[in-house]
């Protein structure tokens, strides 16, 4: 049976990424060796790392002021590395979800943290838009897409200080003006590669400004800038997989083409949710994420939740159970997810609704 993979992360990858990586695990670049048993300093792997970083630069239009790094530790390590390297006295944070609030907690270890606004009072179902970022903040941290709650920042307002962004779940899904950011980071397992590598894009002249606190070598971005992400052994297999995805992005026509496809996928799914008589969306409409769509059963039908999950599973739908902090359902629509998968999910939703039609009161005209 065809499986439709809507997992939030680790999540769907393009077929070419998976099969090329599988091939390289058996025989890497005709070396007769596995990708898993070659030196990261071999000329063959250095070529992989260089091409992958060059493709990130090309696809995201990264200016010469910034360096692209591939690090370990996940996006979660960036919650501490960012303030370790960039917070001198004070930083501002926008609290839009569980990941954002984890980043805030870590930053508090390093200095004053000004949470400019939070949507925690309504279980993070919207993006706050009215806030004031102090001019003397060292940076303003945002989470561009809130994977768990299905909200996304569709407008990034200009502020007076450099920005730092967790783009784990929407990097490469739309164009980004990298010049506005001192730092962008993203765990690879949402839109790029298997888990194990984190993409970091850092403005080099923002580094080495923290004076009153030594930064451990491995946690210092400058270490990795100077060594082109080869200070220690990088995650070789995930970086190879990332290169395959980046090549596929380029062949697909680049970020704007991916963005358009993402818009189409989200539009048809949200249309189905909004025209349904048993389902309803959970996030504020203007802030709905193009990457993670969250919805639930309306109150009168809430008892059907487990039945819908089983029904969808029987149709091949995988990974649509919502995060425990939201409940309901979530479909992740990352770059590698074809629109056909969304159409299949929509058909399942329609059929399930028809099955329960007798319970649904007739439309009052
Ligand atoms: C998944 C995710 C994280 C955590 O990533 P790890 O690589 O598991 O540390 C952080 N932020 C966002 C927005 C995420 O989606």
Image (cartoon, rainbow, N blue to C red):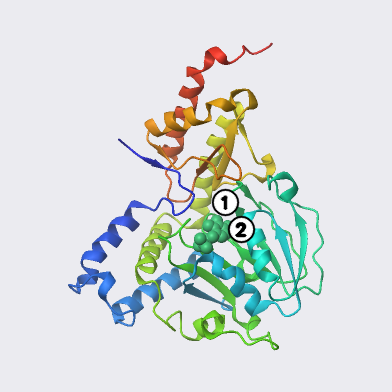
Crowd rating for badge 2 (residues with CA inside 10 Å; few <14, some 14–19, many 20+): many
State the quadrant of the C terminus: top right
Looking at the image, which residue is at 47% across and 62% down?
188
274 or 322, which is in the foreground?
322
CB of residue at label 2: within 8 Å of ligand 1?
yes
144 up-or-down from 87: above or below: above
244 or 276, which is in the foreground?
276
Looking at the image, which residue is at 43% across and 51% down?
11
The residue labelled by disc 2 is 99
- Where residue 283 appears, x then y in whole percent? 65, 41
CB of residue at label 1: within 8 Å of ligand 1?
yes
264 up-or-down from 363: above or below: below
Q: Quadrant of residue 214?
A: bottom right
- Where residue 100 appears, x then y in whole percent? 65, 59
170 or 81, which is in the foreground?
81
Looking at the image, which residue is at 45% across and 72% down?
53
The residue labelled by disc 1 is 147
Secondary element type, mark 1: loop
Crowd rating for badge 1 (residues with CA inside 10 Å; few <14, some 14–19, many 20+): many
Left-right relation of 166 to 310: right
């Amino acid at each position: 049976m065809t499986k439709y993979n809507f997992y939030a992360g680790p999540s769907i990858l393009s077929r070419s990424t998976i099969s090329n990586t599988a091939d390289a695990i058996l025989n890497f670049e005709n070396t007769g060796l596995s990708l898993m048993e070659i030196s990261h300093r071999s000329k063959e792997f250095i070529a992989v790392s260089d091409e992958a970083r060059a493709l990130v630069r090309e696809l995201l239009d990264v200016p010469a002021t910034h360096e692209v790094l591939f690090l370990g530790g996940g996006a979660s390590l960036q919650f501490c590395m960012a303030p370790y390297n960039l917070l001198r006295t004070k930083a501002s944070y926008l609290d839009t979800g569980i990941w954002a609030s984890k980043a805030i907690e870590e930053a508090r270890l390093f200095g004053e943290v000004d949470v400019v606004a939070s949507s925690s009072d309504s279980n993070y179902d919207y993006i706050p838009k009215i806030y004031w970022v102090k001019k003397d903040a060292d940076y303003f941290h945002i989470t561009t897409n809130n994977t768990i709650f299905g909200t996304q920042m569709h407008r990034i307002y200009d502020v007076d200080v450099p920005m730092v962004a967790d783009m784990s779940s929407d990097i490469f899904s739309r164009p980004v003006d990298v010049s506005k950011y001192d730092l962008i980071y993203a765990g690879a397992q949402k839109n790029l590669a298997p888990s194990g590598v984190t993409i970091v894009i850092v403005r080099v002249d923002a580094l080495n400004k923290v004076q009153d606190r030594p930064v451990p070598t491995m946690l210092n971005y400058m270490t990795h800038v100077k060594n082109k992400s080869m200070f220690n052994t990088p995650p070789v297999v995930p970086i190879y997989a990332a290169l395959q995805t980046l090549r596929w992005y380029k062949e697909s026509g680049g970020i704007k083409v991916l963005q358009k496809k993402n818009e189409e996928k989200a539009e048809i799914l949200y249309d189905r949710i909004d025209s349904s008589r048993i389902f309803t969306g959970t996030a504020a409409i203007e802030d709905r994420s193009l990457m993670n769509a969250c919805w639930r059963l309306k109150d009168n039908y809430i008892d059907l939740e487990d039945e819908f999950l089983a029904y969808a599973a029987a149709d091949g739908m995988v990974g649509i159970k919502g995060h425990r902090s939201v409940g309901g359902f979530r479909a992740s629509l990352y770059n590698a997810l074809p629109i056909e998968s969304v159409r299949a999910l929509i058909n399942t939703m329609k059929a399930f609704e028809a099955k329960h039609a007798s319970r649904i009161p007739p439309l009052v005209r």
